[in-house]
Image (spheres, rainbow, N blue to C red):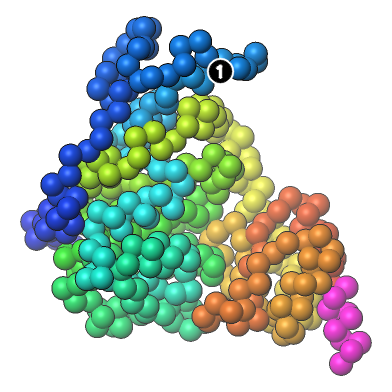
Amino acid sequence: MNHNKIISNFNLNSLIRTNILHIEPYLSAREEYNKNNKSIFLDANENSFGAPLSFYNSYNRYPDPLQKKLKKKISEVKNISESKIFLGNGSDEIIDLIYRIFSRPTIDHSIILPPTYGMYEVSGKIHGVDIVKVFLTKEEYQLNLKKIKQVINPYSRIIFICSPNNPTGNDLKRKDIQSIIKEFKTGIVVLDEAYIDFSDKKSFSTEIDNYPNLIILQTLSKSWGLAGLRIGIAITSESIIKWMNKVKYPYNISQIAQKIAIKALENKDLFFYHLKNILSERKYMEDSLNEISIIHKIYPSSSNFLLVKVTCSSTNLYKYLVEKNIIVRDRTKIILCNKCLRITVGTHEENQYLINKIKKYSKKCFKIK
């Protein structure tokens, strides 16, 4: 692949919405002065006496708007330059920013590849951007390259690709993803790698310098177990990050979220221990569920969940599990996911309980027949 050809033919500024291109960003007090934390800060209208908290009293100050310490720690863990990392209040904020920067309401459209993560469509509709859908291939859940290329036109600004994909759980073929990135030179490719740590496939993040039109989404919500903190990660060119920083809200990630995330990232041994257990439990669930008569198919998974197709009504099974205090997701109304449940990998005890209840339901269904 000729990476230099991709770079030379890509014009980022031509994709920026006109109103964004000429925007004067809001500068917070901490961005104007961020050199000495021991200074007397009388610049941001904070409460200098502190919060009414006896146990911890440093939340009266605004957090670092650019999350420099947290980005440094993420760069060390992922071996990616800090300058190529943007942090959002969850990946959903980053998706919203991408639409705000690159898509003109009522003019442009984005391309999504269902079944996939629902916020690509919801966020686009919020911004008045048309959504063009190209379904993944049936059963294999892979990119339909021919149809994707057919729908691309001058008003195509963003293509969202999710790999490993949600809700199907599978990896998309690397060569197909590369083909889209290489040929879509007039827009932005968003590659959502939220579940990449559960896959044995290599992340595209280490190759980001080769793809100026690529934004990779990752997160601390899944493999790092920090969903409650809402920290999404974008890995992309410094040019694109410059625009994200201009458009984002000044203090989009709280001080306590930044501190806890840094502590978690420092504990890599426990991270890998949990990751190993999740992968082991995924295999256990797959093997155990395959022995149950109402399980029609378990789709290959490179994520922390399984997409499970049943022979009976998935909705009825879902309701039965709810009665047993087990909450999964019924995906039967999602395109290409008829009679499917999406089941997250739990602890061994949780997984055993789930499997036993499905076994009992299966026997009940057999008796009815």
Q: Residue 126 appears in which quarter of the rendering?
A: bottom left
Magenta stretch: give its range: 360-369
Q: Quick one: 195 or 107, which is closer to the camera?
A: 107
Q: Is residue 35 visible?
A: yes
Is residue 19 shown left or right of residue 236?
left
In the image, residue 224 lies at what x, y percent? 55, 42
- Residue 346 position (above or below residue 49): below
Is residue 216 shown left or right of residue 59?
left
Q: Is residue 216 visible?
A: no
Residue linked to disc 1 = 51
Going 27% across and 44% down the picture, which residue do you hit? 247
Assign a secondary structure to mark 1.
loop
Q: Main secondary structure of the magenta part?
A: helix
Task: Identify the image quadrant of the C terminus.
Answer: bottom right
- Tell me the amino acid under the disc marked 1: Ala
In the image, residue 135 lies at what x, y percent? 41, 80
In the image, residue 139 lies at what x, y percent? 52, 82
Is residue 340 shown left or right of residue 152?
right
Going 16% across and 65% down the picture, which residue do you hit? 186
Is residue 34 shown left or right of residue 197?
left
> Counting other residues with Cα less than 10 Å from the Cα at mark 1, is it few (<14), some (14-19), or many (20 or more)?
few
